[in-house]
């Protein structure tokens, strides 16, 4: 695969831009240099609005929020971030983030580069784990948390999910990624441009994902940040009602709901109206 400095070829970049073209609001690309590389941030919404950081799930990109940004950006300045070392338009440096302290330092640097003292962070799946981990790391910088079917936060993965994902992890390809997506979502219809980008993201070269541990229950109980957790009722990654029970035990102040028609990978883009309404309502009710 040819490389233009992004670690991506022309087909991937064209597919990324095609999904970004689905965004129904004007987008401002921002590139933030750091010791880890250059982070691409897609910004939209009123420049003076309260900041909202969006962290995508693993195997996707910051362009994936096309079904959500119109509602989220009405009041908020939205920043959708491509992580360094994963598929997207961020450019890895000589030393991309290698471990959890690096990852948290990188995200702190992104907030610094954007001039943000404190913010709401919304993350999906693996992005939800990063959001929660950062909220525990820097509670004064994280005003609110929105976790969309977060993984490795309150419960582990289902064994059957991991077994089904294994071929895609060992020998990633666009066809395997799309087949896995079809299985997990039950064939939920999605935009062809997004589906093409999802397949190409599976073939993104030299992907390095930082893996960390599930937060300890005693640490979770110290978190007082207002938190909304939305779980996918049809998700195969973990058992949503078991996750909800774990949240009630370890993060009792969190608002938690199970959305019955959504799967793990289809959140946030499938039938997004209900999800968007719940997130916006939470942000409005908890606004400082």
Image: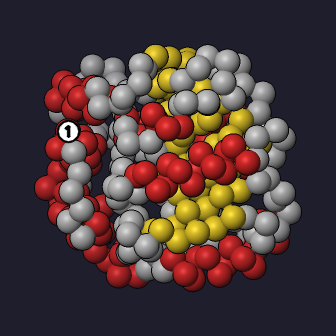
Toward the left, the furthest residue is: 175
Residue 224 image offset from top left, x and y in percent = 84, 57
Residue 219 image offset from top left, x and y in percent = 80, 65
Nearest the eye: 4 or 128: 128
Residue 274 image offset from top left, x and y in percent = 47, 56
Quadrant of the image for the N terminus? top left
The residue at which mark 1 appears reads as: 193
Give the residue displayed 69% in from the left and 29% down from the top.
50
| Secondary structure of residue under mark 1 | helix
The answer to whether 201 appears left or right of 156 in the picture is left
Q: Decide if residue 248 is in sight here.
A: yes
Nearest the eye: 277 or 97: 277
* Crowd rating for badge 1 (residues with CA inside 10 Å; few <14, some 14–19, many 20+): some
Nearest the eye: 49 or 30: 49
Residue 162 image offset from top left, x and y in percent = 37, 74
Quadrant of the image for the C terminus? top right
The answer to whether 13 appears left or right of 72 in the picture is left
Give the residue displayed 39% in from the left and 66% down from the top.
262
């Amino acid at each position: 695969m040819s490389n233009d400095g992004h670690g991506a070829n022309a087909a991937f970049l064209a597919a990324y831009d095609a999904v970004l073209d689905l965004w129904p609001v004007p987008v401002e690309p921002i590139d933030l240099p750091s010791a880890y590389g250059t982070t691409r941030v897609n910004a939209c919404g009123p420049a003076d609005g309260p900041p909202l950081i969006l962290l995508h799930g693993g195997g996707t990109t910051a362009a994936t929020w096309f079904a959500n940004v119109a509602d989220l950006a009405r009041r908020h300045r939205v920043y959708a971030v491509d992580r360094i070392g994963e598929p997207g338009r961020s450019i890895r440096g000589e030393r991309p983030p290698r471990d959890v302290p690096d990852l948290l330092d990188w995200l702190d640097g992104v907030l610094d580069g954007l001039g943000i003292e404190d913010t709401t962070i919304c993350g999906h799946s693996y992005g939800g784990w990063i959001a929660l981990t950062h909220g525990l790391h820097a509670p004064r910088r994280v005003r609110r948390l929105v976790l969309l079917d977060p993984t490795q936060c309150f419960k582990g993965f289902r064994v059957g999910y991991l077994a089904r994902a294994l071929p895609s992890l060992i020998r990633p390809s666009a066809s395997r990624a799309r087949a896995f997506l079809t299985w997990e979502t039950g064939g939920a219809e999605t935009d062809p441009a997004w589906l093409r980008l999802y397949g190409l993201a599976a073939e993104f070269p030299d992907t390095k994902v930082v893996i960390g541990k599930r937060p300890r229950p005693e640490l979770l109980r110290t978190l007082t940040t207002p938190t909304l957790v939305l779980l996918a009722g049809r998700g195969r990654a973990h058992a949503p009602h078991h996750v909800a029970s774990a949240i009630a035990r370890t993060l009792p102040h969190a608002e938690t709901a199970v959305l019955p028609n959504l799967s793990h990978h289809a959140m946030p883009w499938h039938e997004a109206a209900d999800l968007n309404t719940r997130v916006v309502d939470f942000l409005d009710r908890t606004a400082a």
